[in-house]
Amino acid sequence: MNRRSLLLCALTAPLVLDAAFAQEDEFGGGEQPEASAGKDMRRYRCTVSDHIYDPAEGDPAAGVAAGTAFADLPADWVCPDCGASRSDFEPID
Ligand SMILES: [Zn+2]
Protein backbone atom coordinates (compact mmCIF):
# COMPACT_ATOMS: atom_id res chain seq x y z
CA MET A 1 0.00 0.00 0.00
CA ASN A 2 1.36 3.40 -0.92
CA ARG A 3 0.58 5.89 1.79
CA ARG A 4 1.75 8.82 -0.26
CA SER A 5 -0.67 8.29 -3.14
CA LEU A 6 -3.56 7.78 -0.73
CA LEU A 7 -2.74 11.08 0.92
CA LEU A 8 -2.51 12.82 -2.44
CA CYS A 9 -5.88 11.41 -3.42
CA ALA A 10 -7.51 12.69 -0.24
CA LEU A 11 -5.96 16.10 -0.77
CA THR A 12 -6.78 16.58 -4.44
CA ALA A 13 -10.34 15.23 -4.55
CA PRO A 14 -11.90 18.21 -2.73
CA LEU A 15 -9.84 20.60 -4.84
CA VAL A 16 -11.17 19.08 -8.05
CA LEU A 17 -14.73 19.40 -6.75
CA ASP A 18 -14.13 23.02 -5.80
CA ALA A 19 -12.82 23.77 -9.26
CA ALA A 20 -15.90 22.21 -10.83
CA PHE A 21 -18.22 24.32 -8.70
CA ALA A 22 -16.22 27.46 -9.39
CA GLN A 23 -16.58 26.85 -13.12
CA GLU A 24 -20.30 26.33 -12.79
CA ASP A 25 -20.63 29.64 -10.96
CA GLU A 26 -18.63 31.41 -13.57
CA PHE A 27 -20.60 30.19 -16.54
CA GLY A 28 -24.05 29.71 -15.04
CA GLY A 29 -25.49 33.19 -14.55
CA GLY A 30 -23.49 34.22 -11.52
CA GLU A 31 -25.19 37.60 -11.38
CA GLN A 32 -27.70 36.73 -8.69
CA PRO A 33 -26.73 37.56 -5.11
CA GLU A 34 -25.69 34.64 -2.91
CA ALA A 35 -28.67 35.15 -0.62
CA SER A 36 -31.01 34.21 -3.44
CA ALA A 37 -29.55 30.71 -3.81
CA GLY A 38 -32.34 28.15 -3.79
CA LYS A 39 -35.07 30.76 -3.92
CA ASP A 40 -37.76 31.05 -6.56
CA MET A 41 -36.23 33.74 -8.75
CA ARG A 42 -38.65 33.31 -11.61
CA ARG A 43 -40.32 36.32 -13.14
CA TYR A 44 -44.03 36.74 -12.50
CA ARG A 45 -46.62 38.19 -14.84
CA CYS A 46 -49.71 40.11 -13.83
CA THR A 47 -52.70 38.28 -15.33
CA VAL A 48 -54.63 41.58 -15.41
CA SER A 49 -52.22 43.99 -17.11
CA ASP A 50 -49.39 41.66 -18.27
CA HIS A 51 -46.93 43.63 -16.14
CA ILE A 52 -43.79 41.57 -15.52
CA TYR A 53 -42.19 41.49 -12.08
CA ASP A 54 -38.50 40.63 -12.52
CA PRO A 55 -36.66 39.73 -9.27
CA ALA A 56 -33.40 40.84 -10.88
CA GLU A 57 -34.79 44.36 -11.11
CA GLY A 58 -37.12 44.48 -8.13
CA ASP A 59 -39.56 47.37 -7.98
CA PRO A 60 -37.54 50.44 -6.99
CA ALA A 61 -40.59 52.71 -7.19
CA ALA A 62 -42.21 50.64 -4.43
CA GLY A 63 -39.02 50.39 -2.38
CA VAL A 64 -38.34 46.80 -3.45
CA ALA A 65 -34.62 46.23 -3.95
CA ALA A 66 -33.22 44.43 -6.96
CA GLY A 67 -32.73 40.73 -6.20
CA THR A 68 -35.98 40.43 -4.23
CA ALA A 69 -37.78 37.17 -5.03
CA PHE A 70 -41.49 37.43 -5.78
CA ALA A 71 -42.21 35.43 -2.62
CA ASP A 72 -40.30 38.02 -0.59
CA LEU A 73 -42.33 40.99 -1.78
CA PRO A 74 -44.17 42.87 0.98
CA ALA A 75 -47.66 41.49 1.64
CA ASP A 76 -49.17 44.78 0.55
CA TRP A 77 -47.23 44.96 -2.70
CA VAL A 78 -49.48 45.49 -5.71
CA CYS A 79 -48.97 45.58 -9.46
CA PRO A 80 -47.39 48.95 -10.37
CA ASP A 81 -49.45 49.05 -13.55
CA CYS A 82 -52.97 48.16 -12.44
CA GLY A 83 -52.93 47.69 -8.67
CA ALA A 84 -53.73 43.98 -8.79
CA SER A 85 -52.60 42.02 -5.74
CA ARG A 86 -49.83 39.40 -5.69
CA SER A 87 -52.36 36.60 -6.07
CA ASP A 88 -53.15 37.91 -9.56
CA PHE A 89 -49.60 37.14 -10.68
CA GLU A 90 -48.43 33.86 -12.17
CA PRO A 91 -44.87 32.61 -12.65
CA ILE A 92 -43.20 32.65 -16.05
CA ASP A 93 -41.14 29.56 -16.73
ZN1 LIG B 1 -51.19 44.51 -13.35
Image (cartoon, rainbow, N blue to C red):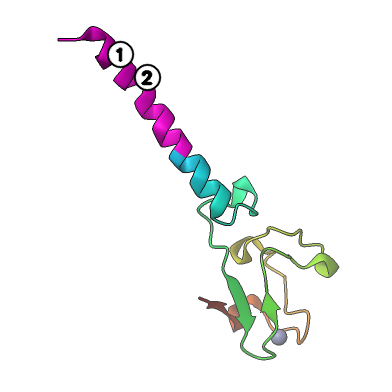
Q: Which mark is residue 11?
A: 2
- Determine which quarter of the picture holds residue 61: bottom right
Do labels 1 and 2 touch, CB within 8 Å? yes
Q: Nearer the viewer, residue 63 or 5?
A: 5
Residue at image position (50%, 76%) is 93
- Where residue 42 appears, x then y in whole percent? 56, 68
- Where residue 49 appears, x then y in whole percent? 70, 90
Name, please, the residue furthest toward the right: 61
Residue at image position (74%, 59%) is 66
For disc 2, the neighbor class at 10 Å (few under 14, some 14 to 19, many from 20) is: few
Circle 2: residue type: Leu
Is residue 16 left or right of 87 when viewed as pictured?
Answer: left
Circle 1: residue type: Leu
Is residue 60 left or right of 9 when viewed as pictured?
Answer: right
Query: As displayed, is residue 83 above or below residue 1?
Result: below
Q: Nearer the viewer, residue 93 or 50?
A: 93
Pointer 1 residue:
7
Q: Is mark 2 within 8 Å of ligand 1?
A: no
Query: As displayed, is residue 93 above or below residue 25?
Result: below
- Determine which quarter of the picture holds residue 82: bottom right
- Determine which quarter of the picture holds residue 16: top left
Residue at image position (55%, 78%) is 92
Q: Which quarter of the image is occupied by the N terminus?
A: top left
Q: Residue 10 colored magenta?
A: yes
Residues shaded magenta: 1-19
Name, please, the residue furthest toward the left: 1
Q: Which mark is residue 41?
A: none
